Image: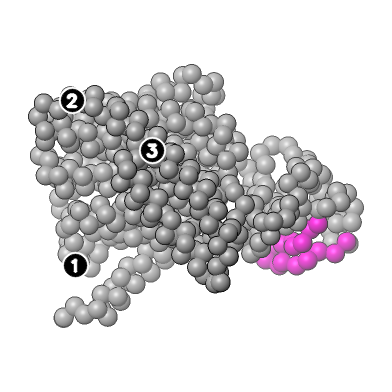
Amino acid sequence: MILTLELLLVGIALLFLISIVANKFSERLGVPALLIFLIVGMLAGSEGPGGIPFDDPALAQIIGIIALAYILFSGGLDTRWEQIQPVLWPGIALSTLGVVLTSILLGAFAVLVLGFPPLAGFLLGAVVSSTDAAAVFSVLRTARARLQGNLRPFLELESGSNDPMAILLTTGIIGLILIPGSSFFTLIPMFVQQMAVGGLLGYGIGQAIVWLLNRLKLESEGLYPVLTLTMVLLTYGLTATVGGNGFIAVYIAGLVMGNSIVVHKKSLIRFHDGIAWLMQILMFLALGLLVFPSELLPAIVPGLLAAIFLILVARPVAVLITLLPWKMPMNEKALVSWVGLRGAVPIILATYPLVAGVPNAETIFNIVFFIVLVSALVHGTSIPSVARWLGLAAPLEETRRLSREFEVDPDTPSELLELVIPPDAPAVGKQVVDLGLPKGALIILMQKGDERFVPGGSTIIEAGDTLLLLTTDDLAEMVRVRLISGEGPADVSAPEA
């Protein structure tokens, strides 16, 4: 059969369709999406039923970098500053020192136990030293894995900001292998430069995005998503060109925009959430296509040993040492140690030695891929259970089912507040007219089961009802206390305009 453009488009569409449908079943089975996408890519590859020939690490690397930039931007866009502010410094410490310690421990294991040459062993440690933002975001933002307090923003901050250190370690060790006599200490000023330039440009361009969105007054609403798509590429490309880290820049740019008042903010957040899912599917499919299952067989034993050591020793030791200066409860440290999801980033970094022609590059790539598979199976399926066992699972489901359909004018002080009524809330059994809501707070939509309607004064509030209120920022906390008493973890989503 001659491969035509039409057949190519059909094949691409089928791959995406299979991935989307499989992801639906993965949620029911408790299997992370990244594992499904990788398996679909492997089955579609040259050694699978799909038979698609793909053996281009450089192209896979480019796809991965672009996809990760959009995923990180979306992650920053959906993160509230007040959530990460209390965990900013421990998060930064874990994304820098924690990555270095993980790399050293796993590298030493690869040398002493797996028999790798010293530099090759530490290169393996560097490649898998960081947790993966796409994997962490996709797992922690499901209802099954809701966590108490600031644990979710802490883990997302770590995963969104630890890539620069892993990239620096990987490229630095590759340089040491290919350029005899080079010094590892030259990486220190390079790291400082990348973090500083990336942080400053990310913040500056983030402010520029906010200014453009609010001042351009574009004729078509459809151009606003195009503008933000363009700015993500500009942020990454410009930052990397001038010697900064593009990944940290796009994450901070998204964080700035997500915590500012901008026009069409809700629709832009939904748009970039869709783009992030598209990029995840594309990235994992491409990386799955790059893998030859027959070559994974020799990597099973060393990969399994390395994965076990990483999960049970390297990650926990790195977390405990790094977080010593902060008084974090031991059960929270244990959960942070367990949420060490490896995903696309280690596989993307494993393409760097392949592209550079480093000795043992194929072995490193296959072991890294096997580690990612083990991590996805072990971490991705067990985080909700471990969180419950440690007493850190949030009891109520956060929801934005109603507020996602509404927007508030950014030029007004109004705010949308959405919450689910828990069984022990004082509002249960009362009519709307008897709730005693403060002046300036109005219930504009209500959901009972599958029915959505505008409530009247005689509507009775029941446990499990979802309420959408129009209020102001200064009244939001009062409304929470009045309706749900404010006890326990807040089950409230208060999205901005």
Mark in front: 1 vs 3: 3
Q: Residue at x 51, y 21 (%)?
A: 326
Q: Which residue is mark 1?
A: 51
Residue 276's quadrant in the figure? bottom left
As drawn, the label of residue 486 is: none
* Image quarter in which the N terminus is found: bottom left
Q: Which residues are magenta?
A: 442-457
As drawn, the label of residue 197 is: 3
Is residue 247 found left or right of 154 in the rendered image? left
Is residue 64 found left or right of 147 in the rendered image? left
Mark in front: 2 vs 3: 3
Q: CA distance from mark 2 to mark 3?
A: 23 Å
Q: Are marks 2 and 3 in contact (CB under 8 Å)?
A: no
Q: Amino acid at mark 2?
A: Ser
**Crowdedness near tag 3: few (<14), some (14–19) or many (≥20) residues, C-alpha within 10 Å:** many
Q: Which residue is mark 2?
A: 183
**Which of the two discs, 1 and 3, labels the residue nearer the N terminus?**
1
Q: Residue at x 66, y 61 (%)?
A: 407
**Crowdedness near tag 1: few (<14), some (14–19) or many (≥20) residues, C-alpha within 10 Å:** few
